[in-house]
Image (tube, rainbow, N blue to C red):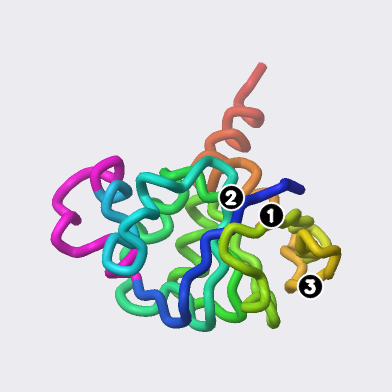
Amino acid sequence: MSGPHRVWKLPAQVDTDALAPGSWMQHGIDVIAQHCLESLRPDFAAGVQPGDVVVAGADFGIGSSREQAAAALRHLGVAAVIAPSFAGLFFRNAFNLGLLLLTCPGCERIAEGESITLDAATGRVTRANGEVLQADPIPPFLLAMVQAGGLLPQLKSRFATRTSP
C-alpha cells in the first residue's frame, strides 16, 4: 500500500450523489463509475489511474447510503480516500467493498497532484516534502477486509478454507 500515490484533491462535504450520480443509478457500476465526481471534477473518471488517492475535506461521503458511491471509486482503482472525517454509512460501505479510508486531521495540506506514500497499519501518510501526517491507524480486521477486496471476498475465502479437504 506504500506508494507512491498521485493525489486528487476534493473539497469538504462531497456527497454520495457526486460520487454515484442518481441519474445513472439504473446502470451497472461500470457505467456509474464513468460519471463519478463529474459534477465536481469532470476530468476525474477519465483521468484517475489505479493506485491514485483522493484527498478531501471533512465529511466525505455525506448524503444517501448508496454503496455505489464507494464502489465507483474502487472500480476506478482508487487506492484510498484520505479526509479529516467521513459520513458513517459511507465509512462502513467503503470498508465492506474493500476501499481504504484514512481519517487524517491536517490532510488538507496535501496538494493536488502530489505524490504521497501510505502505511495503513500505522496511519502514516508521508508527503513528497517529507512531512509525515498521522492518520488513525486501521484496525487489523478492517485492514484484512480491504486486503481481501471487501467483506464478501473475505468471507468467501474464509469459508472456502474451512470446507477444503
**Which quadrant holds residue 67?**
bottom left
The residues bearing labels 1 and 2 have C-alpha atoms spaced at a distance of 13 Å
**Above-or-below relation of 148 to 160:** below
Number of the front mark, 1 or 2: 1
Left of 7 or right of it: where is 136? right
**Residue 24 drawn at (x, y percent):** 17, 55
**Residue 40 drawn at (x, y percent):** 33, 68
**Residue 20 drawn at (x, y percent):** 29, 60
Q: Residue at x 62, y 68 (%)?
A: 111
Amino acid, disc 1:
Ser
Q: Which mark is residue 115?
A: 1
Left of 97 or right of it: where is 45? left
Residue beneath label 3, please?
133
**Above-or-below relation of 66 to 145:** below
Mark 3 touches mark 2? (CB < 8 Å):
no
Number of the front mark, 1 or 3: 1
